[in-house]
Amino acid sequence: MQYDSSFMTTLHQAPPMRRLALLLLLPVSLSAQSADLVLRHATIYTVNAKAPNAQAVAVKDGKIVYVGSDAGVAKFVGPSTRSFDLTGRFVYPGFVDSHAHFTGIGQREMTLNLEGTRTKEAFLARVDSAVKKARPGAWVAGRGWIETFWSPPLFPTRQDLDRIAPNNPVVLTRADGHASVANSMALRLAKVTKTTAVPSGGAINMDRDGEPTGMLIDHAQGLVLGIVPVATEADLERALQLASERELSLGWTQVQDAHGSWREVERMRKLYRDGRLKIRIYKTITGPGAEADRLIAQGPGESEFNDRFEVRAIKLVMDGALGSRGAALLAPYSDDVTNVGLITMDTVAAKDMMRRALKAGLQVWTHAIGDRGNRLTLNLYEGAFKAVPVAQRKVADPRWRDEHSQIVSPPDLVRFKQLGIIPSMQPSHAIGDLFFVPSRLGLERTKGAYAWQTFFSMGLPVAGGTDAPVERGEPMIEFYAAVARKSLDGKSGPGWHPEEKVTRAQALKMFTWNGAFAAFEERRHGSIEVGKAADFTVLDQDIMKVPEAQILKTKNVMTVVGGEIVYGGK
């Protein structure tokens, strides 16, 4: 251990009693110098432009106290320091998922998971297996199917499900959460017929005979999902815990949770108090409505549970999704010329709510997929900013967000910069959607689609997310999609616009500093710098240098949140 030279000189020159007093202080100095955790012999990417690379990092009381060389970190190693030799490992700021549905991630782990069913036959086989395990009359519910990969790429029908589930009500939600298919028993129990009134912001697909096909779009899903037996409180708590464990194992240190209620907030708080949640959660409340009004009345919440939980944003939904043809378009779908998608939001209520939220200092997120959905979102944001000048706002820089920003009319791209809107985008959407987007929209409308590099070139802090459980929710898939803009097997096609892919440095920033900025946390998280929270993601490969395909094979080996090793480290 090394000490300041002036201290040693004073020690040697002091009278005997004074020297004794100084010696008694020496263990205190030793303790102050010792770190709780040291990671060394690593390749560290700091996302700090002033010192972008390092070999070692030291942590004390959950904060970073040293970033630099292996030689320099030696003075921080004491008797109680946990020190890890990470030779051959790569350290990054803790990865931030800027858009996911946290409870849904856990529920996917607990129910029928239809993710990865690349054919209709595989989809039906997995449902058939679940039905055979269920008692007669019991509900079978699941999520995760995407028909665009099937041949032909057509929605499933109630008749498809009836053949394998004649004695069980079945409802299966598409991966995007904007459409569900139900069998005849489920429709019958929900009293959905050809004469059923269609909820605003929804659709009931009909066959040639005018009967329901079983497909329910956006708000119409509630007709059936509303009668599915409600999960117990224990189930919901278990879902949150499973979500936390899964995300940490993948290397995520924070999830920014899109949608939520105050009941869910209290459930999360309970699990934090019990020590069952270790990940950071930046939580939104669904609006407009009473739940959002409650948040507006109380204003932005303080960070809780040692900076691991915060509630300060409202989440709205402007339109549906492209896959189910619910995304709101300025012109009809190319493959469904009678359809321009759905506006799912009460825009009158949203207009008033946005102005009150801006005054209260709250962040607003709005789900917007189609070019009309994005334009209306920008219009509402602009109207709120004009109606509530900076002097009347609790927070001068509101950092309002456009969630997904998938299809934007080229003239509207620059409006993000003009209004200061954060594009919160999920790269994996592009490498899945672009197989069908050209046929849905035509090649001309793909020019403003998934425009990551365009936004970066404007100087906008594109925040990267996953939209899990809509997508798989894995950071390496998202990073790969951002830098390759190719399918997982390396393919692309007309309308994929490879010029919109980002550099690896930009991609890393999407999932670290930009995510922190999008949550007002860039001074506390997002980069590896002295004074910031010790959040690290440790990988077994260098994603900044390995060939693109190797990114997908990279594994997380350690996750650190606030100096605590919450995954790996053995």
Image: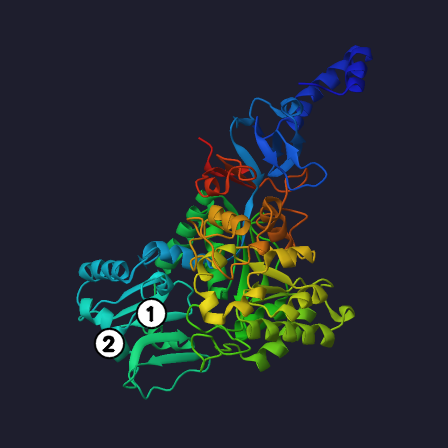
- Identify the image quadrant of residue 163: bottom left
- x and y, in percent, of residue 83 in the image: 54, 26
Q: Which residue corresponds to mark 1?
A: 154
Please indicate whether residue 339 sits to the left or right of residue 561 in the image. Answer: left
- Identify the image quadrant of residue 58: top right
Of the two numbered discs 1 and 2 on the same chain, state the one appearing first in sequence. 1
For the point 64% across and 59% down, the residue is: 455
Disc 1 residue crowd, few under 14, some 14–19, many 20+, Cα 10 Å: few
Residues at marks 1 and 2, CA–CA distance in whole angstroms = 18 Å
Please indicate whether residue 19 sits to the left or right of residue 86 in the image. Answer: right
For the point 21% across and 58% down, the residue is: 129
Give the number of the mark in front: 1 or 2. 1
- Location of residue 260 with respect to 335 vertically, above or below: above
Q: Are marks 1 and 2 in contact (CB under 8 Å)?
A: no
Front one among 87 and 94: 87
- x and y, in percent, of residue 84 in the image: 52, 27
* Residue 78 at least partly seen: yes
Look at label 2 and name its amino acid.
Answer: Ser
Please indicate whether residue 190 sits to the left or right of residue 78 in the image. Answer: left
Q: How is the image coloured?
A: rainbow
| Disc 1 element | loop
Please indicate whether residue 389 sits to the left or right of residue 180 in the image. Answer: right
Q: Which residue corresponds to mark 2?
A: 184
